[in-house]
Image (cartoon, rainbow, N blue to C red):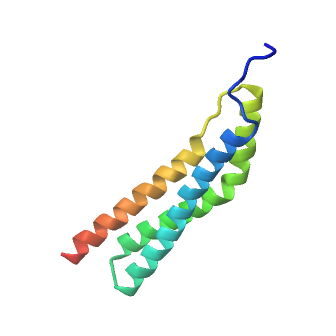
Amino acid sequence: MPGSEEIWDEGLQSERTRLAWVRTAVALSTGGLAATGLALRHGLPAFAIAGFALAALCGGVLLIRTRVRFRRVQAALHAGTPLDAGLDAVFAWLGTLSVVAGAVAFVVSVR
């Protein structure tokens, strides 16, 4: 319809989504690396170290996949097709659960 305003800004929705995924990936990778270093320095059990290292790895994979995901989101938005976040969501959840597992191992080992 001419004259009607559409709520559409080309590229900004997918750019905000990309930035959110980047924040998640950076938080997982840097937090995982820092926690792994602390766990190694303080002699925590291997389970805690592995959990934190897995979180850092998941964050790194998400960061690498950000560009591919951005292009898929852009294509889906402009084509009007649904987008499946499947694999990226799995890595985000796996990283988050790894941090939780490492933190639980830390708390149990400190007692």
**Residue 62's spot in the image, x, y percent?**
61, 56
Place residue 89 in its image quadrant. top right
- For the point 58% across and 48% down, the residue is 88
Place residue 72 in its image quadrant. top right
- For the point 65% across and 28% down, the residue is 82
- In this view, the residue farthest toward the left is 111
| Front position in the image: 105 or 18 | 18
| Front position in the image: 56 or 8 | 8
- For the point 59% across and 45% down, the residue is 87
**Residue 65's spot in the image, x, y percent?**
67, 54
- In this view, the residue farthest toward the front is 3
| 110 to the left or right of 58 | left
**Residue 54's spot in the image, x, y percent?**
49, 65
| 90 to the left or right of 83 | left
- In this view, the residue farthest toward the right is 2
**Residue 96's spot in the image, x, y percent?**
44, 56
- In this view, the residue farthest toward the top is 1
In this rendering, is residue 110 above or below 59? below
For the C terminus, the quadrant is bottom left
For the N terminus, the quadrant is top right
| 49 to the left or right of 83 | left
| Front position in the image: 23 or 68 | 23
In this rendering, is residue 79 above or below 16? above
Place residue 38 in its image quadrant. bottom left
